[in-house]
Amino acid sequence: MRRFLLCASGLIALVGSGVLAQKVTTADEYAQLMKSNAQAIGATNKAIGSGAYADAKMQVATLRKNYMALQGFWTDKKKDDAVVIVKDGLTRLDALDKILSAPTVDQMAAQAAAKEFGGATCGACHKLYREGDAQSGFKFKPGVL
């Protein structure tokens, strides 16, 4: 019973905070989410570099929430390869979170996991669906949506 109450309370908190309620349907909403991801991965890297692992875990939580929204976006667009990339990203975030949750955090491993997440996940999706750069901005390639 205690476990049930704990899980139910957590679910209510998630719904109340918008973690489960976020829905991305437009290219503009997607762009906002991508800006949030860029800020979160930058803050994650900075926090890991300075040994502020609790702060890094908060950024990983933001990335996880955003990636859950991305999963819905790409599922709605019927882009199975993008859904696979997002799921891979979530798996990589779980691995990073596990490293950051260790009693003694291996800073090098955390930095490597964060870099791997950004390179493998973000890079794969950008290669398939996006064009542009950080200076000029990214947009969807013609025909993607």
Image (tube, grey):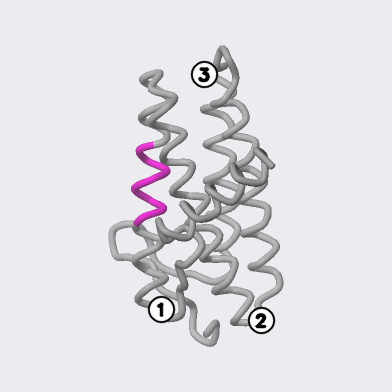
Where does label 3 land, which residue? 107
- Amino acid beneath label 3: Gln
Where does label 2 land, which residue? 78
| Image point (61%, 51%), residue name | 89
Residue at the outermost front position: 1
Proximity of marks 1 and 2: CB atoms separated by less than 8 Å: no
Mark 1 or 2 closer to N-term? Answer: 1
| Image point (40%, 61%), residue name | 34
- Range of residues picked out in magenta: 36-43
- Amino acid beneath label 2: Lys
Where does label 1 land, which residue? 27
Provide the secondary structure element on which disc 1 rests. helix
Residue at the outermost left position: 135
| Image point (48%, 44%), residue name | 61
Mark 2 or 3 closer to N-term? Answer: 2
Is 37 a magenta residue?
yes
The quarter holding residue 83 reads bottom right
Position of residue 60 measured from the top left corner of the image (x, y, whole percent): 48, 41
Question: As displayed, is residue 16 above or below residue 76?
Answer: above
Provide the secondary structure element on which disc 3 rests. helix
From the image, give the main secondary structure of the stretch colored magenta.
Answer: helix
Whole-number angstrom distance, CA of label 1 to CA of label 2 = 15 Å
Q: Using the image as rendered, state which of residue 20 and residue 2 is in the foreground.
A: 2
Q: Using the image as rendered, state which of residue 88 and residue 64 is in the foreground.
A: 64
Whole-number angstrom distance, CA of label 1 to CA of label 3 = 36 Å
Is 50 a magenta residue?
no
Question: As displayed, is residue 79 above or below residue 56?
Answer: below
Position of residue 86 measured from the top left corner of the image (x, y, whole percent): 62, 59
